[in-house]
């Protein structure tokens, strides 16, 4: 409506000059910030990227188009929200964000195989992801169905002290999104008592201090616009018996949720339906976390998934940068009614160094999965 | 309803400013043409020109004691409820009162449209702050001598200036103590031979212009 008004006004004022405005207005971003990739199986991803001063690589306006279907917008914006690194002896405790935008590492061709290095800092490439599916034909080769999957990767690397962090946003040709961070570079080299570390030098002299990397992501889901999105939490009771029964909890208010082995969440828009009249949703799994829990003054580490009402100034999970908002995600989640959910996922990795870590340190990854649930009525690929 | 009217008015403002700019630059044909071609889309990052302009606008209105306030950096305002406008947020720190000032600049109207202030809010250090922290570290009688000595050993030459060191700063903002209010940071210092100084206990207080060592 307002855009239409603006265009009308623009037309009135700039008179009948050549009209490049509508085309530009329709586009969220332009080259080289626009990524529009159709993968070999016909799945299409369209998004914008930005290297922000504080959060570093940020993806915005992520739209997924399954083959033969209409485009569905998924994320309005998504970025790293903190990398919290507490050492096992209690100190030091780092918050590695960090002006990530200025810590960005220039990428070489070898860092981005077969891809394109946008502004020399962001790699856009595709790579195989193994089997998409395999179904035997029971002796009939024509009935056999097998396909190899591909994924679109958007990545950037940052040098933070000794560590190099590689941040990836992976968009699968099955509609999945995998945010993950890899830690590489070098170990800190801090020595500690044997109970807080692992001997990586000759003999038992140098005990490298163990530590955690607690990575937080912030994701503003807007399924076909920001209205009507709801977050649900699913649990399955009956452990120790033969039966499993599903329970659904709708998170109508801001929530600090903890992981369960079978627990998952989804962001669903009940007004957006697939061909089966099922509401379109994206599922969030967070099952690979070490679930680090810090002291009371690090309450942001006390939950694994936070659901908060959208607020532009709530950007980081800890050490937030805006005077208008509170300082950490545990304080954002204070029971407000949620009409436009933002999800914060906390994935911890406890790093106990080993001899192989020196040097350069082999990359270790941490992340989670976002998968489409009922975006299409059947497998579109 | 009211909201819609406001947005329409804002749109009109932007269009008018756009017209003015075209008139102003029309005398310089090549630049004007370039300006038109480089008009960013709504979701594009800020251009270098926009960053410079936002910084100027945000600090022009700054009547605080100069030398005590500093522009840290400019970030695009990505508030989805203000998508029609192209906005920048300028992060300014006032060391005399330990206050963070965030000024939102509307790049269409070239005006500061919002200002928020807060104490104890510490966005990441800027490049200039990292360098200043290194200067303070080098000025410390004991620690500074240690840094120079390590540099000499690693590089085989004397440290000429703090910019010889590869620096990365992180905010140190504990719940209690002086650094709960002051702007304090930790530095990672890489030497030319690829090693890092052990700086994990060193905190540089930019507000007090002091260096102290943590104990644990
Ligand atoms: Cu580690």
Image: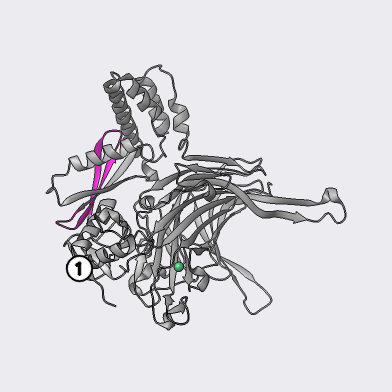
Position of A98 relative to B38 (above/below): below
Q: Secondary structure at mark 1?
A: helix
Q: Is residue A191 above or below residue B102?
A: below
Q: Quadrant of residue A192?
A: bottom left
Region of the chain picked out in magenta, as a range: B94-117
Residue A5: x and y, percent? 39, 29
Farthest left residue?
B65
Q: Chain of mark 1?
A: B
On whether residue B107 falls in the magenta region, the answer is yes
Residue placed at 14% from the left, 49% from the top?
Answer: B67
| Secondary structure mainly formed by the magenta segment | strand
Q: How is the image coloured?
A: one colour
Q: Residue furthest right?
A: A139
Relative placement, left or right, of A207 versus A377 is: left
| Quadrant into which the N terminus of chain B falls | top left
Decide if residue A219 is in sight here: yes
Q: Is residue A35 above or below residue A87?
A: above
In terms of depth relative to the viewer, which is nearer, A172 or B156? B156
Residue A221 spot, x, y in % from top left? 48, 51
Which quadrant is the C terminus of chain B positioned in? bottom left
Q: Residue at x 13, y 47 (%)?
A: B66
Residue A130 position by quadrant: bottom right
Residue A39 counted in the magenta span: no
Mark 1 surroundings: few (<14), some (14-19) or many (≥20) residues within 10 A: some
What residue is pinned by disc 1?
Answer: B178
Q: Position of residue A245 (x, y in %)?
A: 63, 70
């Amino acid at each position: 409506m307002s855009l239409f008004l603006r265009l009308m006004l623009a037309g009135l004022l700039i008179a009948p000059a050549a009209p490049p405005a509508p085309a530009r207005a329709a586009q969220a971003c332009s080259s080289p910030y626009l990524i529009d990739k159709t993968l070999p199986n016909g799945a299409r991803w369209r998004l914008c990227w930005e290297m922000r001063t504080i959060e570093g690589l940020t993806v915005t306006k992520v739209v997924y188009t399954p083959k033969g279907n209409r485009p569905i917008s998924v994320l309005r914006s998504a970025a790293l929200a903190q990398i919290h690194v507490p050492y096992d002896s209690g100190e030091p405790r780092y918050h590695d964000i960090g002006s990530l935008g200025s810590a960005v590492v220039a990428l070489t061709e070898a860092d981005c195989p077969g891809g394109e290095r946008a502004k020399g800092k962001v790699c856009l490439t595709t790579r195989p992801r193994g089997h998409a599916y395999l179904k035997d034909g029971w002796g009939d080769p024509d009935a056999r169905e097998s396909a190899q999957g591909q994924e679109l990767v958007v990545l950037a690397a940052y040098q933070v002290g000794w560590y190099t962090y590689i941040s990836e946003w992976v968009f699968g040709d099955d509609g999945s999104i995998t945010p993950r961070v890899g830690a590489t570079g070098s170990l800190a080299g801090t020595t500690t008592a044997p109970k807080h570390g692992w001997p990586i030098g000759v003999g038992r002299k140098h005990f490298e201090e163990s530590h955690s990397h607690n990575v937080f992501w912030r994701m503003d889901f807007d399924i076909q616009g920001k209205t009507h999105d709801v977050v649900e939490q699913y649990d399955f009771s009956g452990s120790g018996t033969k039966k499993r029964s599903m329970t659904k909890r709708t998170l109508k208010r801001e929530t600090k949720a903890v992981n369960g082995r079978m627990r998952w969440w989804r962001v669903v828009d009940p007004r957006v339906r697939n061909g089966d009249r099922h509401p379109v949703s994206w599922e969030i799994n967070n099952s690979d976390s070490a679930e680090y829990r810090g002291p009371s003054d690090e309450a942001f580490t006390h939950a694994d998934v936070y659901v908060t009402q959208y607020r532009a100034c709530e950007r980081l999970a800890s050490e937030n940068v805006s005077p208008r908002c509170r300082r950490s995600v545990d304080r954002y989640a204070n029971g407000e009614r949620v009409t436009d959910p933002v999800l914060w996922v906390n994935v911890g990795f406890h790093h106990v160094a080993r001899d192989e870590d020196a040097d350069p340190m082999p990359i270790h990854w941490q992340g989670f999965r976002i998968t489409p649930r009922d975006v299409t009525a059947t497998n579109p690929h | 309803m009211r909201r819609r009217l406001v947005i329409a008015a804002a749109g009109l403002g932007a269009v008018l400013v756009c017209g003015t700019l075209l008139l102003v630059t029309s005398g310089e044909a090549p630049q004007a043409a370039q300006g038109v071609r480089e008009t960013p889309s709504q979701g594009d990052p800020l251009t270098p020109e926009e960053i410079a302009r936002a910084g100027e606008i945000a600090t022009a209105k700054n009547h605080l004691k100069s030398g005590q306030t500093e522009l840290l950096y400019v970030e695009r305002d990505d508030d989805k409820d203000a998508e029609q406008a192209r906005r920048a947020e300028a992060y300014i720190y006032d060391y005399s009162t330990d206050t963070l000032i965030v000024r939102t600049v509307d790049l269409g109207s070239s005006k500061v449209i919002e200002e928020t202030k807060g104490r104890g809010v510490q966005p990441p250090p800027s490049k200039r702050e990292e360098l200043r922290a290194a200067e303070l570290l080098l000025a410390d009688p004991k620690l500074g001598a240690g840094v120079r000595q390590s540099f000499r050993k690693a590089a085989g030459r004397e440290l000429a200036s703090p910019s010889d060191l590869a620096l990365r700063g992180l905010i140190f903002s504990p719940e209690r103590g002086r650094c709960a209010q002051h702007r304090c940071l930790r530095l990672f210092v890489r030497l030319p031979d690829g090693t890092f100084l052990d700086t994990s206990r060193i905190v540089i207080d930019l507000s007090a212009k002091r260096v102290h060592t943590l104990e644990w």
